[in-house]
Amino acid sequence: MESKKCTKCGKGKPTTNFYKNPKTKDRLSSWCKSCVLQSTKKWKKNYPEKHKQSSDNWKENNPEKNKQSFKKWSNRLGAGVYALYSKGECLYVGESKQIAFRLWSHFAHIKNPKTLQGNNPKLYNNFRQHDYIYAGVIENCDNHKKREQYWINKLKPAYNG
């Protein structure tokens, strides 16, 4: 297996740990994926306005790619049953054909009440009482509506019902 040295961290890594870059001689980025992701995360945190503007510009200039990217992202966890937890306590059990999208919408509603648009405000007010909420996929399945009730009965979440 071929390897390459990252110019950021100085570590030698397999070439699969580098993004492709057609502008370089070896057609690979000079920084490893870990360093690129770390740098990107830091930049997003330090420049949130620029990040939002850059993201909005890309979406506007690449509507078809954006649509495909969102579709791929929203389907990545598949269909099934999921749960929201805080400090080991099951708060809520839900089901969806697109778990990733559904979890994203839950966290958007928790973070910003203005996004609710008729959704259950009491549920999200309850969620906001917790310092930290995390999610987990309980089961991937096609009969997620039936399985949701099974998991509600088993886990007895605080906010279902």
Image (spheres, rainbow, N blue to C red):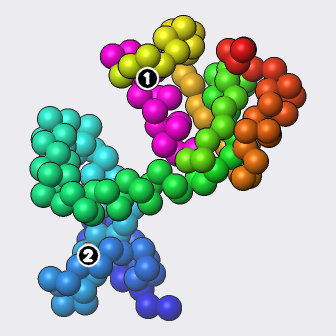
Res. 82 image quadrant: top right
Query: Residue 115: x, y in percent?
Result: 36, 22
* 4 lies above or below 104: below
Residue 134 shows up from this direction: yes
Name the mark on residue 109.
1
User: Which amino acid type is shown beneath numbered disc 2?
Assistant: Ser
Answer left or right for 137 relative to 36. Answer: right
User: Which amino acid type is shown beneath numbered disc 1?
Assistant: His
- Is 113 magenta? The answer is yes
Mark 1, residues whose alpha carbon is within 10 Å: few (<14), some, or many (≥20)? many
Mark 2, residues whose alpha carbon is within 10 Å: few (<14), some, or many (≥20)? many
Query: Residue 76: x, y in percent?
Result: 53, 56
Magenta span covers which residues? 99-114
Which residue is found at the position 52% from the left and 15% from the top?
A: 120
Which residue is found at the position 20% from the left and 84% from the top?
A: 22
Which residue is found at the position 50% from the left and 29% from the top?
A: 106
Name the mark on residue 29.
2
* 78 lies above or below 12: above
Query: Residue 126: x, y in percent?
Result: 57, 10
Res. 149 image quadrant: top right
**Label 1: which secondary element:** helix
Image quarter (top left, top right, bottom left or bottom right) of the C terminus: top right
**Label 2: which secondary element:** strand
